[in-house]
Amino acid sequence: MTSHLPGVSHAHAHKVRLLSFSNVPCGGTPFCWNSKRTLIMKTILSSKVVTAPKNVTLSAKNRIVTVKGPRGELTKSFRHLSCELTKVGRNKLRVDVWFAKRKQLACLQTICSHVNNLIKGVQFGYKYRMRAVYAHFPININMSDENKTVEIRNFLGEKYTRVVKMLDGVTCKHATVKDEIELFGNDIEKVSLSAALIHQAVLVKRKDIRKFLDGIYVSEKTTIDPVV
């Protein structure tokens, strides 16, 4: 007897149907067809659990995670991903991905990493330290708008003033060391992106960057409060 599945024997096709439609245990890998009509496997259910400390509370609704801690509250949406976010107990969050291929399985750990960054942010906060590097013309850095805006002057001797606005929840101030500034915030994505905006504002154009090393670079990434 021949199979209705092209290129697959009847015995193998029967096994495919059993794996696809019978009671396969969680974590099993049923077969399916891709666009090139080749046999691939999907993982029925993959799960990971994120555990928060006692002073942090987690909540999830409509794939939007809210984390509350000593330093405030952070929210992040995962609605662009096909997953299930379920709160388990008081301080645990379970992430489930159904019938996932390799790309969807990779998203599982990505979600957990983002949630762990939120937990660390509301506990300790994030601090990025940046240093101005110059060979001849000293770079002048000033703060304005209640430390929400950075003004950069005299870069490579230019008269143009570069103005960089920090993202929401990020503040900037001068460090104790000369030519250093520090960025503070609870959201690591906004803190790192604000540091990137400052770095990109003083890129050397139309010159050999191996020779002209002037700029503002990230020198240290730490937390505001010491991690216990």
Image (cartoon, helix red, strand yellow):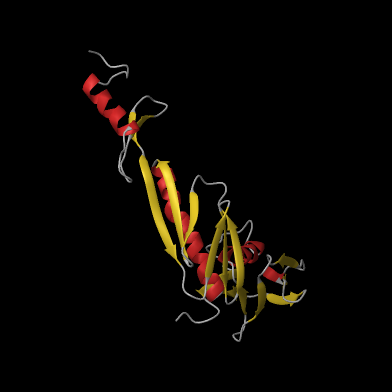
Q: Position of residue 22 (x, y in %)?
A: 31, 33
Residue furthest to the bottom in view is 176
**Foreground pick, 106 / 45:** 45
> Which of the 4 quarters of the picture holds residue 37?
top left
In the rendering, at what x and y percent does residue 174 appear? 65, 81
Residue 30 image position (x, y, % from top left)? 32, 36
Q: Residue at x 72, y 66 (%)?
A: 165
Relative placement, left or right, of 202 versus 223 is right
User: Quick check: can you spot residue 135?
Assistant: no
Tell how many labels.
Answer: 0
Q: Give whichever of 135, 14 is nearer the camera.
A: 14
Which image quadrant is residue 74 in? bottom right
Does 25 sit above or below residue 124?
Answer: above
Relative to the observer, which residue lies in front, 54 or 171?
54
Determine whether, in the image, residue 144 is placed left or right of residue 42.
right
Q: Quadrant of the N terminus?
A: top left
Answer with left or right where residue 113 lies relative to residue 214: left
Residue 178 sits above or below residue 63 on the image: below
Vertical placement of 57 versus 95: above or below? below
Quadrant in the picture for the C terminus:
bottom left
Q: Residue shown at 68%/69% (left/top)?
A: 155
Q: Image point 76% across, 68% down: which residue?
A: 161
**Residue 118 seen in this snapshot:** yes
Counting from the top left corner in percent of width and height, residue 40 is at 34, 33
